[in-house]
Image: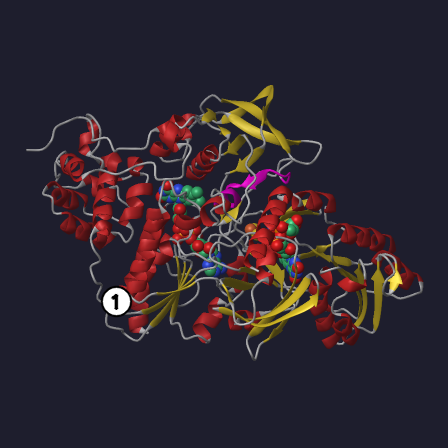
Amino acid sequence: MPNMSLKRNEMPVQAPDVRNRNFQEVALGYTEEQAIDEAKRCLGCKNKPCSTGCPVQIDIPAFIAQVAEGNFAEAYKIITKSSSLPAVCGRVCPQETQCESKCVRGKKGEPVAIGRLERFVADWHNSQSEVSVEKPVPNGHRAAIIGSGPSGLACAGDLAKKGYDVTVFEALHVAGGVLSYGIPEFRLPKSIVQKEIEGLKALGVKVETNTVVGRTVSVDELMNEEGFESVFIGSGAGLPRFMNIPGENLNGVYSANEFLTRINLMKAYKDNSSTPIKAGTRAVIVGGGNVAMDAARCAKRLGADVTIVYRRTEKELPARAEEVEHAKEEGIVFKFLTNPTEITSTEKGWVKGIICQQMKLSEPDASGRAKPVPIEGALFEIEADYVIMAIGTSPNPLIKSTTEGLDTQKWGGIIADEDGLTSKTGVYAGGDAVTGAATVILAMGAGKKAAAAMDEYMQNK
Amino acid sequence: MFEILEKKSLNPTVTLMRINAPKVAKKALPGQFIILRTDSEGERIPLTIADYDRESGSVSIIFQIVGATTEKLNHLNEGDCLQDFVGPLGRATETEGLKKVAVVGGGVGCAIAYPVAKRLHELGVEVHTIAGFRNKDLVILEDEFKAASGKFVLMSDDGSTGEKGLVTDALKKLVESGEKYDRVITIGPLIMMKFVCQLTKQYEIPTVASMNPIMIDGTGMCGGCRLTVGGQTKFACVDGPEFDGHLIDFDEAMARGAMYRDFERKAHEDACNLFKGVE
Ligand SMILES: Cc1cc2nc3c(=O)[nH]c(=O)nc-3n(C[C@H](O)[C@H](O)[C@H](O)COP(=O)(O)OP(=O)(O)OC[C@H]3O[C@@H](n4cnc5c(N)ncnc54)[C@H](O)[C@@H]3O)c2cc1C
Ligand SMILES: Cc1cc2nc3c(=O)[nH]c(=O)nc-3n(C[C@H](O)[C@H](O)[C@H](O)COP(=O)(O)OP(=O)(O)OC[C@H]3O[C@@H](n4cnc5c(N)ncnc54)[C@H](O)[C@@H]3O)c2cc1C
Ligand code: FES
């Protein structure tokens, strides 16, 4: 008999006024009892609406049924048939717009907490004593992966399992892509990311950090000189955008990437860090996505009063619902319909404040959409010691500009077909490098698709 | 690992190291740089590729001890290994079509200028080098520059070696005496480069300045290295480090360079104290 409670099991979290002063993980995860109880809320729908909402079509009812029975190992097996990074995705996927949005239980009450269950299963698996991995039998073919974000890791894992000799090339000194340098420790502990990477190494995947493809070695050299038969480009969308408003190069203006890199990759939040961060007591973050939430919550943890300014209304915030909720609980102030026009300067060239234009919603247009439009003359200044620009990123042009015959969109995205094949034979691409900034699960899915296509290509060559 | 194959002190505060880094050596070109970390907790710092040997797979760096990381680096010895060493980064110096060039270096900037001068010399370009130092104890690479330059002018602030005066004085003299350069390449402290660029603007000599803003990743990912050039924002690590000197907003670059001054001073003191404890 299913559990018919309209409400899902709450997941224990650190209290807001405690966690907003530390960098430890906010959400603590279900206990076995909570997980089983939550799993019993699933009705096991035959047509699996939830799975259709999952970008990689995990067999959700099947894994949840195993959780309900306490068969966590079996549940893990089912998830990993479709996903390579369950401990990560369980934490960072926007479930409310994906699987959980399709859950029948959500029509009257709250949907089954699919994300929390996924996280539980993955964490349970990771807490078990090491199961020795069997190294696949080598098939004699070599593949190169550029970038060690979720797309690259997923592609590498699938190819390695098929026996390919796989090398991942990463520009930074740490693998993991955005999972390592962008998403903060309190949302995604770095030990989880490292565990995934260790898992790949155990399968025989080689990871070469400190290698900037396009500078240290080119795609053509990898293929023509170093003997890689096929290449996957998962280089992400790491080039930060700025607004091009006056004052943006003042001291104290950071791109979200720089701020988060200093904190996550270089550990500038620790007292003994050798990398500095200049964080005053009043911070303004511009933007409304996950990146803006992460930057805001980091600034809070470094001791600042934090304001997020966003051009549209709360409804349009692109961030995960849970992050917005957590940010509010932690005391972050949101100013909606607010568009920065200038950053003002102290005499010494530091940020003094940010001048914003108050917006309002226009009358809905023909399609029924209301646009933010400025309210004439409604300008105001927010005082700040530092400002973080979190208004988006685009793909870095380095690989395109150093790889002959690789076609890209005007805005920089690599052009690839359904399977990830680019305009260059043997060269595949996926993740943010193709789509522009998107999500972990889409990047992972693209890596897996490309791995299948690369397998076919190398086998039939 | 990136082993230190050779270490040589060039003056009391400037050290040369040759590092085993075959992948970097294979692709390096003058004007490019690397980013290194000394240890697993270390900061990422950029240093110019001073020289490279593709055959033996080694890359030389020349650094001035100015703060915590360069202090730590200087405490490593032959046989020790660096944690990370990535490159070559940035764009190489453009040399096409050049016939006669003045290279103007200041202080440790001469270490960055030297490989450029050498490359131009190898390409058959006539190179005149002006190198400025505060005093004679700080002079580096004098013989190397002489070998690569048709003319070499040494300047010092206090007159303890070469001629007394600023590099701009020397450049002015050469130009006024009728030397015609199709390019000036200047590398050194921002304030020096600013004045060199002001001077060459008067003479309408195209000028390239090599910029050293604070960097982290060096791949275009953080924007921390941004500069304003001709009213546009540029990332020095991927668009540079060399830019049209007549278009650079030097005042902004100087302000940005001072962003972490307090932290740096403290970190340097801590590092010095740490090493005092050891010795
Ligand atoms: C702060 C932040 C928070 C986010 N939060 C969420 C979230 O909650 N949920 C969610 O689903 N998504 C989130 N995202 C988005 C998600 O992280 C990305 O969509 C995803 O990481 C893209 O994966 P990828 O493999 O395409 O690229 P990336 O993760 O960007 O990895 C690309 C890697 O390639 C390397 N690289 C780049 N160029 C080269 C080169 N020339 N040579 C070698 N290596 C190279 C980079 O250094 C990097 O390590 C967030 C993003 C950020 C920045
Ligand atoms: C492209 C480039 C090439 C360079 N080449 C050389 C070189 O060949 N030889 C040399 O001696 N120096 C070079 N520098 C400067 C060198 O990177 C700094 O001296 C070094 O980072 C100082 O680190 P520190 O911890 O010892 O000193 P700190 O006390 O941290 O800083 C001292 C000064 O160095 C600068 N600096 C600090 N951190 C960084 C950083 N991460 N990136 C850039 N600058 C920083 C700051 O302006 C600061 O005022 C170069 C810089 C750039 C950007
Ligand atoms: S150093 Fe980060 S973009 Fe240049």
How packed mark 1 is, by other alpha carbons closer than 10 Å (few <14, some 14-19, many 20 or more), is some
At x 52%, y 33%, the residue is: A286
Above or below B179: residue A107:
above
User: Where is B135 relative to A71, above or below?
Assistant: below
Instruction: Identify the image quadrant of residue A102.
Output: top left
Residue B123 image point, x, y percent? 73, 75
Left or right for B152, reference A2: right
**Residue B204 can be seen, yes or no:** no
Q: Which residues are magenta?
A: A249-260
Q: Is residue A250 magenta?
A: yes
Quadrant in which residue B120 is drawn: bottom right
On the image, numbered disc 1 is attached to which residue?
A162
Q: Quadrant of residue A204?
A: bottom left
Image quadrant where one finds the N terminus of chain A = top left
As drawn, which residue projects farthest toward the right? B177
Report the front residue among A233 and B168. Answer: B168
Q: Amino acid at mark 1?
A: Lys
Please provide percent x and percent y for residue B12: 70, 63
Residue A363 included in the magenta stretch of the image:
no
The residue located at (30%, 33%) in the rendering is: A13
Return the x and y of residue B5 as percentages of the image width and height: 56, 73
Q: Does residue B188 appear in this view?
A: yes
How many marks can you see?
Answer: 1
Q: Nearer the viewer, residue A272 or A341?
A: A272
Disc 1 CB within 8 Å of nearest ligand 1 atom: no
Chain hosting mark 1 = A
Q: Residue at x 92, y 65 (%)?
A: B178
Q: Position of residue A365 (x, y in %)?
A: 45, 26
| Residue at the left extreme, as displayed | A1
